[in-house]
Image (spheres, rainbow, N blue to C red):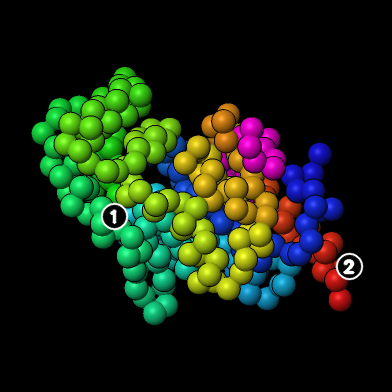
Amino acid sequence: MPLIDTGRLSAPIRLLVVDIDGCLVPVEHASYDLAALARLAELNRRSRIERAVPPLTILSGRPHPYVDALMQLLDITVPAIFENGAGLAVRSPYHARYRQEVERGRGALAKLATELARLPGLTVQPGKSASLTVFPAEPTARIADVERTVAELLERHGLELLIDPAHECVNILVPGVDKGLGLRWLAEEVGVSTGEVAGIGDSVGDLPWLELCGVAVAPANGDERLQARVEAVSAHEDIAAVLELYAAVTEANHALMEEIP
């Protein structure tokens, strides 16, 4: 069965957007498949000379330096989204900027970071300024326990922040700033509609943006709750699923472009 129902598309896909953890690389800080990344970068370069191949970009919860490095590695020239929709990364001219909505939550984020630093067994990911990501320091710890600890701190200190649990961590976001906002911002910057975007993500936190996409796919390793709500689920995991989606989108675009003068 094809990954994309070409009969459902009324216009070509003009942008392919991917999450990082669980899509470009397995979760739990696994090693990258450099050969697969090279194939992905080559497909992205083809987008500059072949109309049917959409350019590639990233929408991730990772901080700007991490996303920026992957943009260089994959030769991404369009903007990308970092920190779960809070920031936009641009390679040329090099800069990054944050949503104004983030400002109202910076005080609460700083207070929560201070409280988390006092607790044993937790690790706060460095490098973020518009959100927080908390990892359990012990490999046997459960994400549900981390989520419960964060929720208790938010209630105790009256902090208006949102919890977004993922496979191996818990993200804490400013209300109203999520990946859905990030995709709309990205589409506006690139000059496409969200319906002209194909996206792939692996966690429930990806639903706000995948639900806006013209094509939404999950890898085989994706959360079952997410898989139940996207258009298709790849038989492959992680970057193999991304490569499959890229090929399927290109094939669908070729078919549409033959029909549309």
Q: Is residue 160 above or below residue 259?
A: above
Which residue does the image show at 64% across and 32% down from the upper left? Answer: 228
Q: Is residue 51 visible?
A: yes
Which residue does the image show at 67% across and 38% down from the upper left? Answer: 233
* Comes first in the chain, label 1 or label 2: 1
Q: Is residue 132 above or below residue 190?
A: above
Q: Is residue 136 left or right of residue 247?
A: left
At label 2, counting other C-alpha atoms closer than 10 Å, the crowd grade (few under 14, some 14-19, many 20 or more) is: few
Residue 34 at what x, y percent from top left? 50, 51
Which residue does the image show at 32% across and 29% down from the upper left? Answer: 147
Q: Is residue 167 left or right of residue 65?
A: right
For label 1, the residue is 130
Of the 4 image quadrants, the one containing the C terminus is bottom right
Residue type, label 1: Ala
Residue 140 at what x, y percent from top left? 31, 20
Q: Residue furthest top?
A: 140
Magenta-tinted stretch: 227-243
At label 1, counting other C-alpha atoms closer than 10 Å, the crowd grade (few under 14, some 14-19, many 20 or more) is: many
Residue type, label 2: Glu
Residue 255 within the magenta-colored segment of the rendering:
no
Residue 40 at what x, y percent from top left? 58, 57
Q: Nearer the viewer, mark 1 or mark 2?
A: 1
For label 2, the residue is 259
Res 10 quadrant in image: bottom right
**Real-space Cα separation, disc 1 to disc 2, in angstroms:** 45 Å
Q: Is residue 66 visible?
A: no
